[in-house]
Image: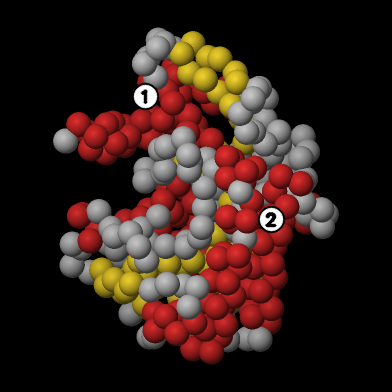
Amino acid sequence: MKTVLVCGAAGFIGKNVLERLLPRTDLRVVAVLHKTGLPGDLAGHPRLTTVYADLTRAEEVARALKGVDAVVQAAATTSGAKDIVNTPAHHVTDNAVMNSLLLRACHDAGVGHFLFFSCTVMYPDQARPVKETDFTGEVTDRYFGVGWTKVYVEKMCEFYARLGRTRCTVMRHSNVYGPHDKYDLERSHVFGATVAKVMAAKDGKVVVWGEGTEARDLLYVADLVDFVEAALDRQKTPFELVNVGAGTAVSVAELVRRVIARSGRPLSVEFDKTKPTIPFSLSVDRAKAKVLFGWEPKTGLDVGIDKSLAWYRDHVVKGAAA
């Protein structure tokens, strides 16, 4: 039985990975937690083992990796556009340290597979979907810190994969959304912030930061987890770097209008150009993911919005009322 360690298990992606892997009887799943625990339905799962560790400390990383066959690395210091613009160092140091320590420890311990959630912030702003080879070596100023940190970790993955002990999968995923997302205005990305604004609006309007012309490739989280499973089960090569996204870009203004429409709330939209925004549009070419892993997204945006709104009502709205 393969033992899979899920780092960042209490986070957005980590929780979704746990929910998918725990029913599998061919896997033993271990969750790495730091300061935040798991919700009751996961914390009490009979097949889950939990380990508390600070992944920026080498001795705690080594302890967490004992007896592990594969690592799904979803631990990160994350937030939304506000912090990327105002406090860019927030995304750099801890993420570089924890991933460096994890990769070295995986190599030292002979861990067979390391899966890393990168992102698409290193890509240029362009009209057509970007391929994995479209990274030019230049990162837009607003994404400079987080973008180069991701590229550094990607290269660390390739370096350790070349040493022959640990296969590495780098997922350059687009903007992920869905259940367990951060639905608040301070820390969330565009989708979570949009849902929070729409569902909490009390004066008949939704205020959007910026002009709403920037566009994002939006990927429902279950589709991302589909890719994780495909990579765990199918990758035999030492190293793969793969785009994982919907393949189309949706403007922020269009996303807001669609969330309002699916919510059924009678709201108007206003744009606040004084608020932080990142004027950048992107979609990814996902052909490589299909060729190598037979993967493509299954969830259309309207269906994903409906599922996300249902989860929000069941967990955020009801939780606040309890």
State which quadrant residue 116 falls in.
bottom right
Where is the N terminus found, in terms of image quarters? bottom left
Where is the C terminus found, in terms of image quarters? top left
Residue at image x 62%, y 43%? Answer: 86
Residue type pointed to by label 1: Ala
Name the one closer to the observer, 263 or 101: 101
Residue type pointed to by label 2: Gly
Residue at image x 46%, y 72%? Answer: 55
Residue 210: percent from the left, percent from the top? Answer: 64, 25
Marks 2 and 1: CB-CB under 8 Å?
no
Residue at image x 42%, y 37%? Answer: 184
Residue 193 in view in this figure: yes
State which quadrant residue 181 falls in.
top left
SS for dot 1 = helix
State which quadrant residue 35 falls in.
bottom left
Residue matched to label 2: 145
Q: Mark 1: few, some, or many residues within 10 Å (few <14, many ≥20)? A: few
CA gap between label 2 and label 1 equals 32 Å
Name the one closer to the observer, 213 or 294: 213
Q: Residue 279 carries which label?
A: none
Residue matched to label 1: 200
Give the mark nearest the N terminus, 2 or 1.
2
Residue 56: percent from the left, percent from the top? Answer: 50, 73
SS for dot 2 = helix
Residue 291 in view in this figure: no
Name the one closer to the observer, 186 or 312: 186
Residue 6: percent from the left, percent from the top? Answer: 40, 67
* Looking at the image, residue 289 lies above or below residue 176: below
